[in-house]
Image: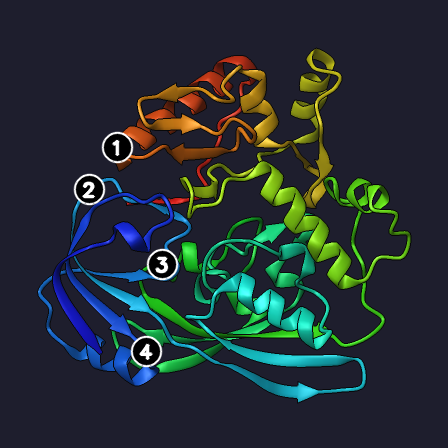
Amino acid sequence: MIIHQNYSLKKLNTFGIDVRASFYVRIDSIADLQKALEKDWELPLMILGGGSNMLLTHNLERVVLHICIKGIEQLKLAEDKVQLRVAAGENWHELVLYCLEKGYGGLENLSLIPGNVGTAPIQNIGAYGVELRDVFLGCQVVSIKEGSSEYMDKAACQFGYRDSVFKRELKGKVIITSIDIELTTRDHFIKTTYGDIASRLKEAGIEKPSISDVSEAVIAIRQAKLPDPAQIGNSGSFFKNPELPRDQFDRLQQRFPDIPHYPAPSGRIKVPAGWLIDQCGLKGFRRGDAGVHQKQALVLVNYGEANGKEILNLAKHVQEEVMIRFGIQLTPEVNIL
């Protein structure tokens, strides 16, 4: 366990916001975590993973516990399926690449999503028609108050669209230390109907895609649309895609016949937030170093020296413009601190 005081988090959040934490603690094992939780810090705790799904708006008078626990363990191998236990500090995309190398299917549509494994269940990460819950079995968590460890199965996690019990009843109460997933080893279910995957594969002349083909298509699409946080600060998709009741969508479609849409649970209709923002003329909009990305309106970016409050104010402006034009309230996908 490594402890630093007055520690800069600039390199530990993908927006590249330069804020400082009163204490920074690197956690490399469950024992480290339990030892850190036993200490009387006299300051609130904050749990940090890959730093990819948050916007920091001020210095943190907190103890930041950075979960860096590593490891991938095979729990069970059957004729057509494999179960893995993956530690929270593993990088998500590196896990996807590991599974592809082994020939394990199920994560290929989730390629190139930033962040670490431990934060993936919190928002039930998803992309191109696949969500984490599709392969999820359960996770190991440590109680912040008690320091005890317990296993939670998928049902207990209460997954929804970019949602879970960890964003609600268990927020600030437990820390995910590993997840268990089940993947296919053969006869993979190839999902290419969402987004531009099918057209990308067709352009490449691929008629019967493998899981690697799908992953490569997803990576190419994301790289063409989304900026690399190593090059320009961002947190990926800043807003959730709104899910509308059928009657509200029907009224909207009468006004905007070309509005893209997808089916969502309970008969609702999902509308791309990026399209809504683009229709408001905000793609490429900029206030100082805080801006809406030029290629993907769903992404807010830090062009260099923007602070968290400036990016937050830009997000509020985007919400206001979408509400005025469409009557839809956009909800941030990132955690704002």
The disc label shown at residue 58, or none: 2
Is 92 placed above or below 221 here? Answer: below
* Label 4, label 2: how far apart the Cα atoms are: 27 Å
Q: Circle 3 sits in a helix, a strand or a loop, which is it?
A: loop
Q: Nearer the viewer, mark 3 or mark 1?
A: 1
Q: Quadrant of residue 225?
A: top right
* Label 2, label 1: how far apart the Cα atoms are: 8 Å
Q: Which tag, 2 or 3, sits closer to the chain's start?
A: 2
Q: Which tag, 2 or 1, sits closer to the chain's start?
A: 2
Residue 90 image position (x, y, % from top left): 46, 70
Q: Which tag, 4 or 3, sits closer to the chain's start?
A: 4
Q: Circle 2 sits in a helix, a strand or a loop, which is it?
A: loop
**Circle 2: residue type:** His
* Label 2, label 3: how far apart the Cα atoms are: 21 Å
Q: Neighbour class for label 4 at 10 Å: few (<14), some, many (≥20)? A: some
Evaluate if marks 1 and 4 touch, with contact meaning CB atoms under 8 Å apart: no
Is 314 placed above or below 40 here? Answer: above
Task: Left or right? Give the position of 100 relative to 119.
Answer: right
**Circle 3: residue type:** Lys
The quarter in which the N terminus is drawn is bottom left
**Circle 4: residue type:** Asp
Residue 64 image position (x, y, % from top left): 23, 62
The residue that disc 4 covers is 28
Please state which of residues 123 and 289 is positioned toward the viewer in this rendering: 289
Q: Circle 1 sits in a helix, a strand or a loop, which is it?
A: helix
The residue that disc 3 covers is 171
The disc label shown at residue 309, or none: 1
